Image (cartoon, grey):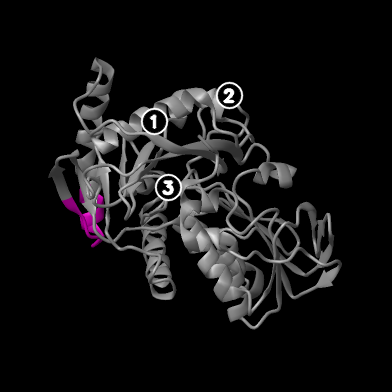
Amino acid sequence: MTSKPGWDDDPVVAAWPGLPALPGDVTADACVVGLGGSGLAAIEALVDRGLSVVAVDAGRVAAGAAGRNGGFLLGGPDAYLHTAIAEWGEDAAVWLYRETLRELDHLAEVLPDVVNRVGSIRLAGLPGEPESADEAADRAREVADLDPHEAALRKHGIAVERYDGPLGTGLFLPDDAAMNPARRALGLANLLQYKAKLYERTTVTAVRSGRVETERGVISSPLVVVAVDGRLDVLLPQLAGRVRTARLQMVATEPIAEPRRLPCPVYGRWGYDYAQQDASGRILCGGGRDLFVEDEWTTATDPSAFVQGYVADLATRMAGEEVAVTRRWAASVGFTSWDDDTPGGEGDGRALCTEVDDGVVAIGGYNGTGNLVGPVAARAAVAHLTDGVAIPYCFAR
């Protein structure tokens, strides 16, 4: 077993030549901290405005959660649309949903060999018969929740179909897509490295108005976007209590006998568990964080035995057969909503897009679903910094 992400087995990812480290002190019109999906979207938005940009990452492009997640490109935020409408209001929730679909259209245009527009399935429960009375009761509650979810989507003209098939009962959302997340980030970085100065292996130690300090030099810039999800509360201690770091864990298996067992990304049990099957037939899946809550509020990124045991069993259920796990890995992500006694820790699930100092906007706290929400937040941050546009209500300011 290894902690290397299963996505890194892709030959394009394995052949990534890398980027240089920051050579010393530099000056630019704008600085972006983080070279994941949201940071790369911020860079794109800034260079499109004609600004010079310096961007840094502590590791390789997408070495964090941006290259270690489930590879789902789903419309909307972490909350299902009807839930987001109830929490934030219809205008904010529907606006964000439509913006994520626009972001997905854009990704499909610039990276057609990475984005696989196959839709997604929200499953009520997990494949197979419930394994306990509690699981059966929870599945019944989720089946009932499909109706208001479907109604909200249809009301706003968002494509949705009922799914009743070998995996169970749920909703099929044809606009969604699958990807290798590391391929997505490296592909964008490859396109942007000729328009901006991108540096890997450059750890940021402090962010202040007009100044980003790293172990390799100081970046002087009047505009700064901090596009870090996991450990955002460590880099910016002033956000402690508003965002909290958690560990998400995944596995990859050997190819299974049925090549299209999962025809598209599948997420079940209220979205806590998720999986997709790649072209080789492997199952790549993760989940179980809610079952090991206290253990997973951590900045550690090593896989843990209890969660990995659960995810290995989950892979078997998703595969419909016994499977052998070949890769195990974990990553840090940010949450803005959690249910415990932490002061300020019971938010409404909105991701952060907030000004933390003059000319400095931080984005993150995507609650595990930042592949499209993150880039939308990044573009909102850039619009706020450069054009004075108010940050949309769907983001916590």
| Residue at 53% over, 53% down | 66
Residue placed under numbered mark 3 in the picture: 70
Decide: is 396 above or below 319.
below
The x, y position of residue 80, in whole percent, is 34, 46
Helix, strand or loop at label 2? It is: loop
Count residues near mark 1 (Cα–Cα under 10 Å), then give few for <14, some for 14-19, many for 20+. Answer: many
Res. 312 mark: 1
328 in magenta:
no
User: Which segment did they paint magenta?
Assistant: 150-161
| Image location (x, y in percent) of residue 386 | 65, 74
The kind of residue tagged 1 is: Ala
Q: Who comes first in sequence, dot 2 or dot 3?
A: 3
To which quarter of the image does residue 36 belong? bottom right
Cα distance, mark 2 to mark 3? 29 Å
Q: Secondary structure at mark 3?
A: loop
Q: Nearer the viewer, residue 3 or 378?
A: 3
- Between discs 1 and 2, the one toward the N terminus: 1
Give the numbered dot on residue 341. 2
Q: Is residue 85 left or right of residue 184?
A: left
Which amino acid lies under the numbered mark 2 shown in the image of this protein? Answer: Asp
> Is 138 left or right of 86, judged from the image as shown?
left
Q: Is residue 157 magenta?
A: yes
Taking the spot 38% from the left edge, 47% from the top edge, the residue there is 84
